[in-house]
């Protein structure tokens, strides 16, 4: 009887050990969620001054981003969505850190002799155990690595003309829905896409100019024989709001002022 009980206990213990070793924990976004919910308003503007006075959660999250990631901890990022959500959140959080480390910045992260050079290229960041800069993170890792133009409605460079910063983190299990919602909101905002039927012109965010190849390459990859910026945008406009094929594009000035709450 005792022998059987010991055998049963051994089997239960072994089963628990197997379940424990098979458990995969996701990268934790709780601190980032707390920051977004407390310091970002519905417009996507940030109370950098208040955050600067109480930055423990941001610093803790950024420290996790600096030491963990898809390369150093692949078990935390088993899918492409896990990886992309991590990189989008990391970019936006590292921008926050950069803004705070500049004072916090009051006017624009683009200030300098060459616009954006100091913030996006010269400012060193650490992510996943590697040193880089924000431009390389965006271009080499996020854009080239995932080939998904929806990210341009999710990455936020602390500027007024950036896409609206959401009040929640991007999460792997709902990432496609979040990115769809972001790009739909972006193209349906007249600041980013405004159709002038009288002039047969479309006034577009400068983002569509800077990253035109991303949108057109996506159209090509998805079988469009006549790819264009407008054909990509039309994917996310309602049927009665489509851009006619003969309309020309113009790009509006990008407001590089800091996206701070006033």
Image: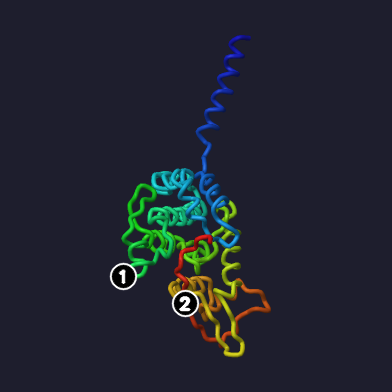
Pick whichever of labels 2 and 1 is earlier in the sequence. Answer: 1
Out of 115 and 124, give the one closest to the viewer.
115
Element at label 1 = loop
> Image height check: is 125 above or below 240?
above
Out of 150 and 17, give the one closest to the viewer.
150
Q: Residue at image x 56%, y 74%?
A: 191
Residue identified by numbered label 2: 253
Q: Where residue 157 appears, x then y in whole percent?
A: 45, 62
Left or right, residue 206 beside residue 176? left
Q: Are marks 2 and 1 in contact (CB under 8 Å)?
A: no
Q: Which mark is residue 113?
A: 1
Q: Where residue 89 appears, x then y in whole percent?
A: 49, 54
> Image height check: is 121 above or below 100?
below
Residue sticking out furthest to the bottom: 198
Q: Residue at image x 55%, y 32%?
A: 19
Badge 2 crowding class, 10 Å Cα cut-off, few under 14, some 14 to 19, many 20 or more, is few
Residue sticking out furthest to the right: 240
């Amino acid at each position: 009887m005792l022998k059987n009980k010991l055998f049963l206990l051994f089997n239960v213990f072994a089963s628990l050990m197997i379940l424990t070793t098979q458990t995969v924990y996701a990268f934790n976004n709780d601190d980032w969620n707390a920051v977004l919910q407390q310091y970002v308003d519905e417009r996507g503007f940030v109370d950098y001054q208040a955050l600067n006075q109480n930055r423990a959660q941001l610093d803790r999250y950024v420290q996790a981003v600096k030491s963990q990631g898809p390369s150093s901890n692949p078990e935390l990022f088993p899918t492409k969505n896990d990886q992309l959500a991590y990189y989008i959140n990391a970019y936006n959080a590292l921008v926050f850190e950069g803004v705070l480390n500049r004072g916090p910045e009051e006017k624009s992260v683009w200030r300098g002799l060459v616009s954006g050079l100091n913030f996006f290229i010269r400012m060193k960041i650490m992510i996943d155990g590697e040193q880089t800069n924000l431009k390389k993170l965006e271009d080499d890792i996020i854009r080239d690595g995932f080939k998904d133009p929806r990210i341009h409605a999710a990455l936020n460079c602390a500027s007024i003309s950036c896409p609206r910063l959401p009040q929640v983190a991007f999460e792997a299990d709902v990432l496609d829905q979040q990115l769809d919602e972001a790009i739909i909101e972006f193209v349906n905002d007249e600041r980013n896409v405004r159709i002038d039927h009288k002039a047969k012109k479309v006034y577009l965010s400068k983002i569509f100019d800077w990253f035109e190849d991303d949108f057109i390459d996506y159209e090509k990859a998805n079988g469009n024989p006549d790819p264009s910026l407008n054909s990509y945008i039309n994917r996310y406009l309602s049927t009665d709001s489509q851009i006619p094929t003969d309309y020309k594009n113009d790009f509006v000035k990008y407001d590089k002022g800091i996206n701070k709450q006033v």
